[in-house]
Amino acid sequence: MSRQNYRILVVDDEMPFMMLLVKILQSENYSVKGVTDPEEAIDLINTFSPNLVISDLKMPKIDGIKLLEITKKKDKDIDFILITAFATVETAVSAMKIGATDYLIKPLKDPEELRLVVNKVYEKYLLLSENIHLKSEFTKDLPPLNLIFAGMTEVFEEVKSVAPLESTIIIYGETGTGKTLIAKVIHHLSKRKGPFVEINCAAIPENLLESELFGHEKGAFTGAHTQKKGKFEIAQDGTIFLDEVSEIPLSLQPKLLKAVHEKTFDRLGSINTLRTNARIIAATNRDLKEMVQEKKFREDLFFRLNVFPIRLLPLRQRVEHIPEIANYILKKISAKIGKKILRIAPNSLNRLKQYPWPGNIRELENIIERSVILCKDIELEIPEQILENISSFTIQETLNPPSTLKLDGDIRTIEKKAIEEALKKTSGNRKKAAEILGISLRSLHYKIKDYGIKK
């Protein structure tokens, strides 16, 4: 809220002093009204709806303490500053215990005293308003923070530290661990004014990816009938989230490097260089350092993206939080489908806790949604045919890998096994297998090739 929209009501039975306060505050661009009659002030609290009341303590009919009580009954969020003489400072301090925000000493020796006290109250109001707005944004778009960061307290501390800065961030995590959610939290906490713009680099064909990222001019290629803005341009003043950044082809990486390093880019078919101030957040489920060694990813681009790495834990390392996460997902999906299912049966929860979740939370969401569709009770039992599909794995396999395997190797083994199982269940239908695994078809193609999975 600007100062012009911040409303202040001044109440003092001495007309010259009241007019002086009004004049000082109007010079600071606040919206101000002044009265000498406390009863008139009570009417204005209803019609003017002030954000702040500044009132003298000693007045006929209704004194400042009584006006404070009336004001707080009408709206407890209205700030209140008492004006008092030296002899009644103790009264003003006592008044702060019942809701006064601050007090001023009368006579006012320097107008700056008034400006400082009112500005402090105004800034506090702005901060509270931003917090309420941020809370409503989380409520609207995202799960509660305690669920997003369940079992990842250190990650939350990292997010809070880096969000207000301009640093480039890369989020590492397996498929389905919530990298997009974390990126959105960072965007909300950054207070950037522009939009959150997401692009999944693995979901767009290579020949279209450059245009999606940087835009194109009319006639730049066959089918380019109009000018198009790219994601970097759309994300001006906001955040661009490059999901699965590891899938960007080597041929396009120099242009991305330029956008990350110099904050400039060119639309396809354009001779004009454009600037971007978008905050860059990237994410990947692969080891970029290993890809650099294999010459599959540029080293200079890796260093530019890897300024502040955040590593998310897989769901199998947050087993104790599976019940609260699963029940939140149940509530969300039940509302979407239109069923009233109150909880997950204890035996089903125990089974869910024994599975290593190679697809992480995305896979958990898929299983709960399929179960909700089939459920005919207020308590959700995971159907046997779904439980059978997840019973071939145990959590111990993941937490206690054979000594011959590295941890990263074990994760790859589990992921490869999950892909093979999905392909087997779908009789080799890659599109359906990708849906079961909660990944893009392009990602599945890549992983099949990477793991050397035979048809």
Image (cartoon, rainbow, N blue to C red):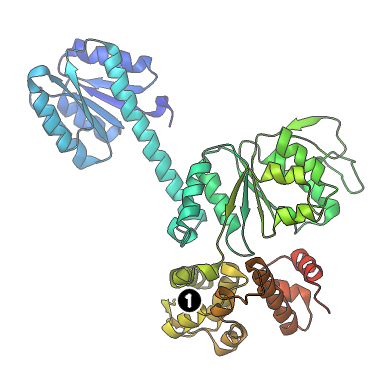
- Secondary structure beneath label 1: loop
Compared to residue 365, the image places residue 177 above or below, namely above
Q: Quadrant of residue 56?
A: top left
Q: Which residue is mark 1?
A: 339
Q: Eyeballing the image, is 302 above or below 31?
A: below
227 to the left or right of 380: right
Please indicate, yes or no, whether residue 356 appears anywhere in the rendered image.
yes
Q: Is residue 245 left or right of residue 208?
A: left
Location of residue 294 with respect to 58 vertically, above or below: below
Viewer-nearest residue: 250 or 384: 250
Q: Residue at x 54, y 76 (%)?
A: 368
Q: What residue do we see at 67% from left, 75% from top?
A: 404
Density class for disc 1 (Cα within 10 Å; few <14, some 14-19, many ≥20) is: some
Instruction: Left or right? Give the position of 254 relative to 170.
Output: right
Residue 436 visible? The answer is: no
The residue sitting at 51% across, 48% down in the picture is: 159
The quarter holding residue 115 reads top left
> Measured from the top left, where is residue 154 in percent x and y?
47, 53
The C terminus sits in image quarter? bottom right
Q: Quadrant of residue 111?
A: top left
Q: Nearer the viewer, residue 384 or 411?
A: 411
What is the three-letter code of the residue carrying label 1? Lys
Judge from the rendering whether residue 393 lies leftward or rightward of residue 113; answer left or right: right
Above or below residue 254? Residue 7 is above
Q: Position of residue 146 (x, y in %)?
A: 43, 58
Residue 100 pos. (x, y %)? 20, 33
Where the N terminus falls, by quadrant? top left
- Residue 57: horizontal and vertical position, in percent? 13, 24
Residue positioned most to the right: 222
User: Total marks drawn?
Assistant: 1
